Image: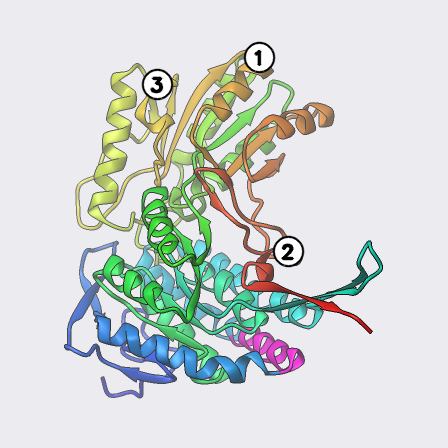
Amino acid sequence: MNLPYNAFPLDQDPYDVRGFPHRLYIGGQWRPSSDGGLIEVTDPSSGAVIAAVPDATLEDAAAAVEAAAKAAKGWRQTAPRKRSEILRRCFELMVERSETLAMLISLENGKALRDARGEVAYAAEFFRWNAEEAVRITGEFGTAPSGANRIVVDYQPIGICILITPWNFPAAMATRKIAPALAAGCTVILKPASETPLTAYALAALYSEAGVPDGVVNVLTTSTPGTLTSAILADPRVRKLSFTGSTGIGRALLAEAAKHVTSCSMELGGNAPFIVFDDADLDAAIDGAMIAKMRNAGEACTAANRIYVQSGIHDAFADGLAQRMAALKIGAGTKADTECGPMITKKAVDKIDRLVKDAVNRGAKALCGGSVPEGDGFFYPPTVLSEVSPDADMAHEEIFGPVAPITRFESEAQAIFHANNTEYGLAAYLYTRDVARGMRVAAEIEAGMIGLNRGLMSDPAAPFGGVKQSGLGREGGQHHGIAEFMEAKYIAVTF
């Protein structure tokens, strides 16, 4: 690579990633892995290799922890206003570079440019929100009930944090963790998904440009995440693990963290129900379903995974949704007119195909799509299935693709039963013109987030997270996000 590793191109060929950082980012320095190992990065629209990033070793992991520890005291003691200004500059730079970042996300992730642009805007907002919250971290002061002493509660940074993010939102999942951690005064080690590492490295260069001190943010890519994470968690200086990903991996990480009594935040799998009552605004419900289902082509933990429609509106809804889905243009994410990009890997396509075939074998009808197309890349067409059995595999597994399975229901009680008949509880959606019914059903649904007459609920100003097997803790929101990266210290004072 001829360009310096901290280069951040403002205008370049979308398929030329040479101007972006490709190396491990440790202590403010760009470096190869200690053994020279590499991980190939592919374009999901073609399967072609577009870059290679270092495959970090245990030696590299130890160096990252050391760098974070070295920077910890200085960042912890940095005035909240100064931290706020740096975070605000991160937001401004992301906005300035939004088109370049969106193109990079589309290239390595495959998502349509319109979705990538939306992700960059959403990801940047976490820096703006936390820049504003960084100066509002306060403690508590009171008198003990006995009157014997005063109670002082101070909130302090929890310490070094390891942040593990998935491939489906390579910018937003990183900033949703990094921004509150930095606002709290913590230093971090980010381990992005190996499928989409380029965005994480590009953002690391941006943070440095914004004034984030060396060692405050470190980035490692690895093909052995379990081994690397275990080694990092074993260091007693590491006091926080924040993970977004599957429930299965989350359980394994919780078990590993328990060995060291490390604080954990877990945003895990979802199986979101999307409920449409007879009295719903049909057009609004279809619009909402398109957003809730097709954001990032369905590769989202909050995606509508099970669509339940009351009998009176079922046929009209199914036909309308099928027309909208069938009209979506499929193509490479980097093409301006693409509305549905490829899936992340062939393995993902194979899983979607398995789930669709299982549903059809159980009586479902494909109103559009339903089969893997020929040609290069990891594509699956937008698909609508009607009369899907509640026993179908896709009713219990995350589809993570552009498939909308519709199941008919009769009563409110039946809708609630279906919605809660899952081990997951991340997000849910419901459409009705009856506000009382909407609030009543929302109260009964076991989920951490509800979209009432909305197909999108994610917001940096709102707490994001789930119940049951969908996770622990919250990200975003007033106090919630930063609180995950702080500890309360009680001081008993006698005057």
Relative to 314, residue 484 above or below: below
C-beta proximity under 8 Å, tags 2 and 3: no
Relative to 432, residue 336 above or below: below
Ranked by sequence position, the earlier of labels 2 and 3 is 3
Mark 1: which secondary structure?
Answer: loop
Q: Main secondary structure of the magenta part?
A: helix
Label drawn at residue 391: 3
The magenta region covers 79-93
The one nearer the camera, 240 or 207, is 240
Alpha carbon separation for disc pair 3 and 1 = 19 Å
C-beta proximity under 8 Å, tags 3 and 1: no
Relative to 207, residue 392 above or below: above
Label drawn at residue 310: none
Mark 2: which secondary structure?
Answer: loop
Residue 479: x and y in percent read 65, 58
Which kind of residue does numbered mark 2 sit on? Ala
Q: Residue at x 57, y 64 (%)?
A: 486
Mark 3: which secondary structure?
Answer: loop
Ranked by sequence position, the earlier of labels 3 and 1 is 3
Residue occupied by mark 1? 411
Which kind of residue does numbered mark 1 sit on? Ser
The one nearer the camera, 432 or 135, is 135
Task: Give left or right: position of 275 versus 246.
Answer: right
